[in-house]
Amino acid sequence: MSHVNLVTGGAGFLGSHLCERLLARGEEVLCMDNFFTGRKENIKHLLGNPSFELIRHDVTEPFFLEADRIYNLACPASPVHYQHNPVKTIKTNVMGALNCLGLAKRVRARVLQASTSEIYGDPEIHPQVESYWGNVNPIGPRSCYDEGKRVAESLFFDYFQQNKVDIRVIRIFNTYGPRMLINDGRVVSNFVVQALRGEPITIYGDGSQTRSFCYYSDLLEGMIRMMDCEGFNGPVNIGNPGEFTILELAEAIIQITGSKSKIERKPLPQNDPTRRKPDISLAKEKLGWEPSVPLHEGLKPTIAYFDGLLKAL
Ligand code: NAD
Ligand code: UDP
């Protein structure tokens, strides 16, 4: 069956790749974005497609349209951008979720929330399983994002229980790839751009903190499988369980780019999680999903993308 999909945040890094994949499946896509961190450039090549429609709209304002599937991705994902206007970040998460759920209830759509590993905060359990409730500072600099995403999850499950809305919740772990912004501020894009420019690689803290990096194509496969899946609402972790220190990431990027960049230490931001790695047993069991692109493989096309962008400047 062909679907009409609403993708909020559809002009962003993950959203634009998602729109592309859904169109490739022969489905209709309504792409909604306010262009805070999204770019027209990301979806320019889709504009001529009759199955694609771009809607400039802010998810904090109600919207009325017809769709049978809603992917709610609208929210800046990089700490630099989500901390720029924390009140707006909370509004985007909470009111964006309410507006998506309200629409889903009215038109009986299935609705998927792009939640995050940040709901685990600075985790005391490693690797993180879905049953872990998290360790989040409710008043720290990351709380606008972490708590906003946590409320969104609550709303999703409340609409499920109270109104029988057909929800799906995935918890995305650090995902990278082409179409991240040059000034995105997240670690992979920062290090790649710094290495290509021969600038110092900025390591926050001693670089011993870990993250697990998932290539965008693997992530999208998990996301779409979750949307397609019957009888399972989640939450489910979607991420790559390969765990690397930030120093190891810097070394890998220096090695692949052949850069002469040196490492520069900067202060560790407040409440920066020390370890992060998904337990993906549930995704394997329920969705038959696991990532296939190791970090070194995914870094190559990502580096090539940024190289092209920097050369065109
Ligand atoms: P991104 O910043 O590239 O994309 C977010 C998109 O949402 C942008 O196009 C932005 O303009 C749009 N947006 C922001 N506020 C909006 C608003 N009020 N109304 C309409 N549009 C708005 O980030 P991304 O990495 O593509 O992340 C997409 C989603 O996945 C986000 O919800 C993010 O929290 C979630 N996520 C991403 C990661 C990751 O590592 N990439 C990890 C966990 C969760
Ligand atoms: N980080 C870093 N240098 C940078 C950007 C980020 O050392 O230029 C670190 C950051 O402190 C964190 C990790 O890299 O420990 C991942 O940061 P990112 O902003 O990508 O995402 P997070 O997982 O923290 O939301």
Image: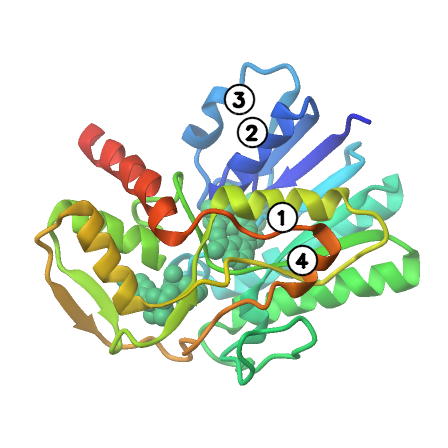
Looking at the rendered structure, the secondary structure element under dot 3 is helix
Marks 3 & 2, CB-CB < 8 Å contact? yes
Give the mark, 3 or 1, whose residue is nearer the N terminus: 3
Q: Specify the quadrant of the image occupied by residue 26.
A: top right
The residue indicated by pointer 1 is 222
- Mark 3 → mark 1, Cα distance in angstroms: 23 Å
Outermost residue toward the bottom?
A: 124
The kind of residue on which mark 2 rests is Glu
Nearest to the eye among marks 3 and 1: give it.
1
Q: Is residue 65 visible?
A: yes
The kind of residue on which mark 3 rests is Leu
The residue indicated by pointer 4 is 283
The residue indicated by pointer 2 is 20
- Mark 2 → mark 4, Cα distance in angstroms: 23 Å
Q: Specify the quadrant of the image occupied by residue 125.
A: bottom right
Give the mark, 2 or 4, whose residue is nearer the N terminus: 2
Looking at the rendered structure, the secondary structure element under dot 2 is helix
- Mark 4 → mark 3, Cα distance in angstroms: 30 Å
Give the mark, 3 or 2, whose residue is nearer the N terminus: 2
- Mark 3 → mark 2, Cα distance in angstroms: 7 Å
Name the quarter where the N terminus is drawn: top right
The residue indicated by pointer 3 is 46
| Badge 2 density bin: few <14, some 14–19, many ≥20, Cα 10 Å | some
Q: Is residue 58 visible?
A: no
